[in-house]
Image: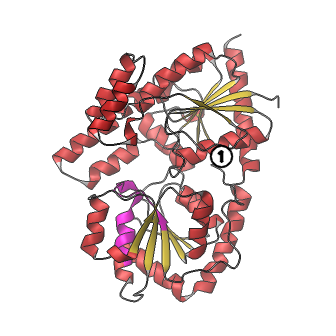
Amino acid sequence: MQKLNIAILSYRSARFGGGQGVYVRDISYALNLIGHKVDVISGPPYPDLHKEVNLIKLPGLNLFETFSFNERFKKFLNKKNKNIYDYYEFFSVLFGGFPEPRTFGIRVKKYLEINKDYDLIIDNQSISYDILNIQKNFPFIEIIHHPITIDYKFELESSQKIKYRISRYRWYSFLKMQKKVAPKIKRIVTPSQSSKKGIINEFKCNEDNISVINNGLDTTEFSPIKDFSRNENRLITTASADVPIKGLDYTLKALKILKKDFPKIHLIVIGNIKEKGHTQRLIKELKIEDDVIFKSNLSKFQIKELYASSSVAIVSSLYEGFGYPVIEAMSCAIPLIATNISSIPELTSKYAKLIEPKNELMISSSVKEMLLDYSKYKEIAYAGRQHIIQNFNWDKIIKEYEEIILKTMKEFKNANL
């Protein structure tokens, strides 16, 4: 395949945590390794890229860096050469919206009108109006990890309070745009069959326009650490607190149950906790404040160390378009308990203990079973690591991407003859 000049667009790419930031880092490096020149064009927060990949910063107001009105107002005032879209971004955030996908699309369209020397554009789930203009001018692939309408539905189900539901309606108002844009995109890549079904059902996209390519994982970065001290009373999970779709409540309730038989048991949560938020209140209500430890802003090596020091990993999500915590835990060869929903069975095959969602009793009984017969489940975990190495390595996955890229470029050329 000829060597290409590729731009990967990402409206935000958090360095620590968040599947989209991980995806941008990994896919850009994988394409670079096979000889393509790759630019990542990103809004803030900016990604942590490999040094071989070029980062082009497309600064927006970055208002979600803080939740202080005064600090947000300073950011707005200090922005030089403000245009109408900066005003739109500020006032949309002021009234509870999330305008970043739309305003990033506007900025990147203007950038690409001047910088036209790209052979291919890959957009990481902004699904914004201006993407359709970019699609007319470049061979174009849209990455949709999963339709965010599903997150919205779970959040509405989590509370009947009118004020909360109004706030969720405002926050997810960008979905109106995505529902209009997605069906008009000619080439979509998604990481699981479950996500493909969701895109068809939620966004009404043509099935023929959607290809499933799993996300990859560097299994040397996520691997067992030889002779590392494991704490037999330590559980580990990855979850954003106060995000209902991650199902953290049920792991916390399971921990409370387990305390009866395992008094020293505790839980590491890779993620942030919101002060005075739902999760903090639940932990206090369950009286497990001393047994839950939140860790955030971790490097991949620090995450690997936490897996090595833990006995059982838990993924209690209510939905996963593609569960990075699932394959990361399996790659580290730690026994895994995960919910039997959406993409998770696709990822785990037979190498994890799958349970019903929203069921703290099944989580607690599964943990107990594993701890009482640990050698058996450790053996399954090592077999699970081989499953991840075989099926989610970047060599395999990047070949699938190259096939889609060639097909996309050929169709674009034929359409413009």
- Name the residue at 64% across, 17% down: 115
Magenta extent: 237-255
User: In this rendering, does residue 176 appear at all?
Assistant: no
Residue 225 horizontal/vertical position (percent): 68, 72
Q: How is the image coloured?
A: secondary structure
Relative side of 130 to 389, left or right: left
Q: Is residue 253 magenta?
A: yes
**Residue 410 located left or right of residue 292:** right
Q: Residue at x 49, y 55 (%)?
A: 342
The vertical placement of 308 against 56, above or below, is below
Q: Circle 1 sits on which residue?
A: 26
Compared to residue 257, the image places residue 141 above or below, namely above
Reply above or below: 46 against 118: below
Which residue lies most toward the right here?
A: 1
Q: Return the residue nearer the eye: 222 or 168.
A: 222
Left of 298 or right of it: where is 257? left
SS class of the residue under badge 1?
helix
- Residue 389, position as x, y percentages in the image: 72, 61
Residue 402 screen position, x and y as percent: 74, 36
**Farthest residue, direction left:** 162
Locate residue 133, reporting x and y percent: 53, 17
Which residue is pictured at 82% across the width and 28% down the height?
Answer: 2
Amino acid on which disc 1 is placed: Asp
> In the picture shown, does residue 113 fall above or below 141?
above
Q: Nearer the viewer, residue 72 or 400?
A: 72
Residue at x 73%, y 39% (from the top left corner): 52
Q: Quadrant of the N terminus?
A: top right
Q: Quadrant of residue 158?
A: bottom left
User: Does residue 247 appear in the picture of this structure?
Assistant: yes
Residue 309 lies within the magenta run: no
